[in-house]
Each structure stands twice: as structure tokens, then as C-alpha cells.
Amino acid sequence: MMRDGRPTILLIGGGHAHCSALDAWARRGTPDARIVLLSPDRHTRYSGMIPETLAGRYEPGAGLIDLDPIAQRVGAVFIRDCCIAIDPRARRAFTASGEPIAFDYASIDTGGAGCAARVLGEDPRLVDVRPIASFLSRQAERDRAAERPPRHIAVVGGGAGGIELTFALRQRYAKASTKLTLVAGHAGVLEGFSASVRRLARKELARQGIALVEEDARLEHSALLAGPHRLEPVDMIVAALAAAAPDWLRDTGLELDADGFIAVDRYQRSLSHPFILAAGDVAARQDRAVPHAGVHAVHAGPVLAANLRNMAEGRAPEDSYRPRPASLFLLSTGPDEAITSYGPLAAQGRWAARLKHWIDTRWISRFRKSAFSV
């Protein structure tokens, strides 16, 4: 596996954590290793800008990160293919095209899988937000194929993603007077957030004429139901549910948690194979609770970069991502306003929308600068 005395580091997937890891190496120097990036797509879509792109504030390409120039910047070999299997004992990954890739150390950040059809049921009107990379293009294809704008859209999922997408859809179809219903589940809107944030979200939903149903959704006999409520007729069902673990992980031999995600320690190392790291939606920390959210994947990236560097250079990993007691969330509610959440604190206004725009575009610009410096 070693070539010219250098170990091989294989990055499987182009998710937010790996983007941040590559950026960290670009800024601070690369490890003394052969680096291989394996991803099926040249571009990664930044999830934080998806709702406002759906709403029309940004052009479709605004939230894309081009992996190719970033890989060149750190001297990585970029292979555009999909990982379909890993043999940890042989330290090999296998691609859809049949090419085996040997590695000494690997990191997995392929993202989570969609579970809408399994949770709700099969239906041709169902649009799963996952895979996130293709959500906007799938939505655009539906619009082009439709004879008219949807008259009624139901969004299933009351988390931050479901809330933002609901408000984005209100903007996208504003001229069509499309009816919108948010089916938030029995836990209600923004479970885990402060009561003040939840109140602001409910108030804004009502202000924009968006119906809220706090019951679990299901599909029965081609009808969308939520608790005792029948929501038909519905033209489109957008599922913004939590990520599920990809099926292919079950055959890797890696230790998984009860939900099928890769079980990792404080250093993001696999509990069963410590030469394999994982982060983002595909991984689950076992030492502490770290929610599956883009903000945590981004912050885990520099930790991956530092620990992979240490391991490749014969040292023990030292860095660990410690989430703050509270994370800043900015939930876009329209073209000019957003709700901000930080622990028990909540507020709403244009300033929050401007702050969100500044944070999102600033993060994306880091990778655009990397492209120009190749």
C-alpha cells in the first residue's frame, strides 16, 4: 500500500467534513502521504444554502463546491466513482466500476441515506430531500414536467430542515397561491429547540398561511394521513426526515450503532477498526451525543485533517470535536427575514437574514479562493 515510503490516505465521499478537512490541509499543509479522494460527483452542494436556492434567492450553482481544484490544491488524486464496499482486513475499498483502492488510512463522509419511502410508504408524489446533492435538480425536473404549479404541497418533517424548506416553498410558489401544510410529527415543530424558537416558528407559519399538523404522517391506500387527519388532495409530498444509515455499511465489518451508523470515538475513529475514521451523517459518536447536522460536520473536518495527519506520520490522534453547549442556528423564513436560535435565546428579523447570508457565502467563498490558487 505504501508507495515511495508514504502511506495512502483515502477519503471516501465529498461531504461537508471532507471539504473542511481538505480546506484545512490546503491552509496548513498536507500530511506526508498519498491522498486519494473518492466521490461520485465533482461538486458537493452546501446544505445550508439549499432552502434559499429553492426559494430563488440564489442561482442553482451558488451553493456548489468544486472538489477537483481543492483536491489539486492538496495534491490529491481525485477519482470520480462511488464506493460500494470496504474490506477493512485487506484495507481496500471497491468502486462501482470495479476498481479496488488500497489504503493505509481511510475516512468516510458519504452522507446519510433517504428513508422517506420506508417510513411513509411508496407514492409517486413523494420527493425525498435525500440524497441532498440531487434534491434541487429533482425538484426542478418535477416543475418542468408538471402541467401546472402544485395546488397543495405537504412537507413532512418538523426539524430545522423541514421548517426552512416549507418557507422556501412558500416563496417558490408564491405567484401560484399554492397551499402548504407542514406535518411536523407528534413531537411538534423544532423538537429540541427552545420554547421561544418554537413559538416564533409557529407564529411565522400562521402569518404566512401555512397549515401546521403536529401528528405523524403516513401513506395509506394512496392517501396522505397525519394522525386522524386526511390531508388530500395533495400534489406533492416533500419529506425532510432525519438521515438513515446507508445500507452498504452493513457489509463492511465496521462496528455500527443500533441505527446502522458507523460507531466512532472522540477522535472520529471506528471503534472496531481505528485506522478508519468517519464523520458527518454516516457516523455516530459513542462518547457523547452529536446531532446529525451540517454545522457539526463542518467543525469535524479540521479534526479529521489533524488526526489523519498524525496517524499517517506515526503519531496518535489528539484532536476531538467538542460541540459548544449551544449552536447558532439561522432559519430562513423569507427573502428578508430569518429566525435565530442560540440555546434558550431566540429572535427574528432582517438582521438575522443578513447574518445567515454572510455566513453561508463566506464559507462557500473559502473554496472558491482555493480554486483560484491552484
Image: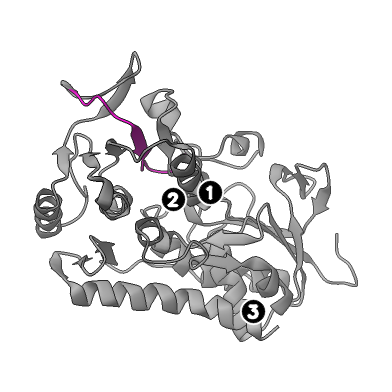
Categorize mark 2 by other alpha carbons within 10 Å: few (<14), some (14-19), many (20+).
Answer: some
x, y percentage for residue 217? Answer: 27, 28
Q: Is residue 262 above or below residue 54?
A: above
SS class of the residue under badge 1?
helix
Q: Amino acid at mark 1?
A: Ser
x, y percentage for residue 208? Answer: 14, 52
N-term mark: 1 or 2: 1
- Judge by depth and name the residue closer to the eye, 73 or 50: 50
- The numbered dot on residue 371 is 3
Question: How many badges with numbers are in the image?
Answer: 3
- Residue pointed to by mark 1: 134
- Judge by depth and name the residue closer to the eye, 285 or 215: 215
Quadrant into which the C terminus falls:
bottom right
**Stretch of the chain drawn in magenta:** 230-244
x, y percentage for residue 140? Answer: 47, 47
Protein image colouring: one colour
Closer to the observer: label 2 or label 3? Answer: 3
Look at the numbered discs 2 and 3 and tell me whether their residues touch, using CB distance below 8 Å. no
Q: Is residue 197 above or below residue 322?
A: above
- Residue pointed to by mark 2: 286
SS class of the residue under badge 2?
loop
N-term mark: 2 or 3: 2
Identified at 49% across, 68% down, the residue is: 62
